[in-house]
Image: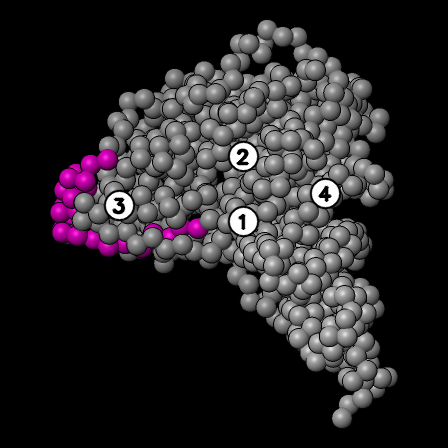
Amino acid sequence: MSNDMGKIRIMPGAGNHGHGGISRRDLMKSAAALGLVAGAGGLLMPGAARADEPKKGGQLRAGILGATTNTNDPALRQDEFGVMAAYTTYNHLVELNPDKTIKPELAESWEAKPGATEWIFNIRKGVEFHNGKTLTADDVIYSINRHRGEKSQSGAKSLMAAIADIKKLDANQIQVTLKSANADFPYNFTGDHMAITPDGFEDWMKPVGTGGYKQTSFEPGVRATWVHNKNYWKPGRAHVEEVEFLVLNDTQARIAALQSGQIDALGLVDPAAVEMLKGNAGVQVVNSSGGQFWSYALNCKKGPFTDPNLREAMKHAIDRKKILDIVLRGNGKIGNDQPLATTDPMFNPDLAQTPYDPEKAKFFLKKAGMESFKIELNTSDATFANSANVGQLYRQAALPAGITIDVVRQPADGYWDQIWLNVDKPMTTGVWMGRPTADMIMSMVYASAAPWNESFWSNARFDELLVQARGELDAGKRKAMYGELQTLIHDNAGHVVPVFADFIDAYSPRVKGLMPTPSWYLMGARFTERVWLEG
Amino acid sequence: MLVILAKRLAMGIVLVLMASALLFFAGELLPGDFATKLLGSSATPETVEALRRSRGVDAPALARYLQWLGGLFRGDLGTSLTNGREIAPLIATRLKNTLILAGAAALIAVPLAVGLGTLAAIFRNRLFDRAILVLSMVTVATPEFFFAYMAIAVFAVNLHWVPSISIITAGMSFERMLPLLALPVLTLVITSCAHMIRMTRASIVSVMDSDYVGTALLKGLPEWKVVVRHVLPNVMSPIAAVVVLNLADLVVGLIIVEAIFAYPGMGQLMVDSVSKQDITVVQACGLIFAATYILLNMIADLLAIALNPRLRYAR
């Protein structure tokens, strides 16, 4: 059990820090087009669901990972609880669609002035907060500014650091000026941190938003309840009458709660539990294939991997298919040492898949002037479940190539602080949730100055091209630029991406309107707004 | 008797103080820290420093320990590092829940264990005794999460008799709480009985082997009468001690059961706080657990003395 508890904490937690955490925090990810979901059996067929008309009413109960430390404050929210609650209580300026496009939410429309550094957002009129106050530009500016400035402790601080200035143009219009051009800027307003609250609001035990549900009780680390917002402005959304989140952290207990009918929705399902759940009458398992990937960071600044030949050897010495089959039980896709899922609009299909080829690995080893080679791989439960076992699979695959990987299992406590991003460690393990745009994930992990450049990779051409692509408004040119960026990462970066892991959710038979949503668990964290209940 | 009581109390206080020091400084040694955990993607050195300062964690450890200790004497457990909320009210609710669960388990387990232990002693070396022996060995040797998951699989998932998660809330009526408590209480009863059964049986058996019991039997008294009249009064003291120690185990040993059933008690709170490195809450929980344990141990000792006249007069 202790083991299981560890696992849970990890998955979601993924750490609150490091990528895992980040990921959660910034949520989104990239995505896959709906269609792709397919793969694993058991998926839900969206078509069937669509045929039904949404029904009103009922109580939707979800098992959510959380802790006593959780808060409704969008800036400091943690865990799955914080993300799911953000999309239940609050709205955001922009909504991310399941196909990774965006559409207006509290911002009715927006436009970039030429050059993509100045953006005008028109705030929707006539929207009421739960306390009866009408939404204005002041509320929006307050909500954004909470993530900016020296004193901000927000998880979205780095994202919002791109903003140079925000101006109120009139009661329903704001202008955002960026420090540098960004053609994808509105995506930054889709993340859960960017929830809109009333101007000056700070009573996080009794949150006020404009979302589909009004929070009626909140016991951190235990449960929270909501009732339907009668004045909800968005048509065709927020169907149920009551929402209840039960904080469930134990892996087995979560599954049992769904099997025994105590909850209707469960995210972060362990791949090992998928087959068992499908054996349960009526339980619906939904796989969403998106940008969540695992990584091995090869230190390009210090130690053996300063030699690109050794990086190349490591990329050929891993059996990705085996890891996908054994550890993820097929619930995912193999990776190709770059961060975009095959379904990402910017994915470069011309990039050849690196095969598992010990001979080729040996060849690169020779090129580096070596017959055999020994390296220490740091893994931790703080990254993804079973990371030490995956490390062992890597070790086995690499042995025939003359590479001996010593798998070290580091304690989860302190992993992100002391082991990961430590320039003295030659090789570490990471996990990333993906981001809504290619630029976000690349700027965060691969740019020389990126905050989480876990492999300490530095490439002048990449850095330059990344900035150009960000400001490029022409779709065709951008796609070509991101294609080259992926090639640079794939060929040269110190990053081995073994697999992309599906987001796996499970629902009780009475939940309808389900569809794979590649941005995160539980329909991109928007399940309370999108599903309805039957019977 | 009063002198003994005073001595025990003084010793208890010293022990609690030692536990507090241990808890505090062990917390200091943990790798990582709450600020980097909480700040995540914005954990630059400056924001971490700002948050640490705002929670008063930048002062030297010894100064913080003394300040914490001072607060404890005023009943102030401090504030949570992660959300800045007062710890005392949070712990009050959780402690109440834990006591409800432990109390319910004890209410069933204690009479059951003492009864079964007595019966085993009476039917010693017969089939009933053997069966009890084997069963108690099995329950002692099996981790409690196993019973918890088995109970969930059988009674919640397959039979649908009771819920598999036990989230109770303030103001919930007793009738509504009962089904929620069923599985955690069942698990605790199974795992806590064995020790008490075996100790009860062993105490009774050892007394039954004594000469005066032999005399009573020889004079023709039925065995049950001998046990109830002559043996039980003499084994009260060791049994009481075992029972109270098991109560202590129940209160502080709920962590796993609470985690599995998502029961909102102290154990769950402690697990949460450890995972978020919210050390002040961990310390407060640990201290309460330590104090409970020390207090109940003290009660066990005192009970043993009170029930055994021979111990009352130190030679």
Category of crowding for the residue at label 4, using alpha-carbon neighbours closer than 10 angstroms: few (below 14), some (14–19), many (at least 20) = many
Q: Nearer the viewer, mark 2 or mark 4?
A: 4
Please tell me which residue is depicted at 52% across the width and 21% down the height of the picture. A516
The answer to whether A468 is drawn above or below residue A39 in the figure is below
Q: Amino acid at mark 4?
A: Ala
Question: In the image, which disc is placed on residue A268?
Answer: 2
Give the CA distance from mark 1 to mark 3. 28 Å
Name the image quarter holding residue A143.
Answer: top right
The residue to which callout 4 is attached is B182
Left or right: residue A346 compared with residue B194: left
**Does residue B170 appear in the picture of this structure?**
yes
**Proximity of marks 4 and 3: CB atoms separated by less than 8 Å:** no
| Boundaries of the magenta span | A356-380
Same-subunit check for callouts 2 and 3: yes
Q: Amino acid at mark 1?
A: Met
Category of crowding for the residue at label 2, using alpha-carbon neighbours closer than 10 angstroms: few (below 14), some (14–19), many (at least 20) = many
| Marked residue nearer the N-terminal end (1 or 3) | 1
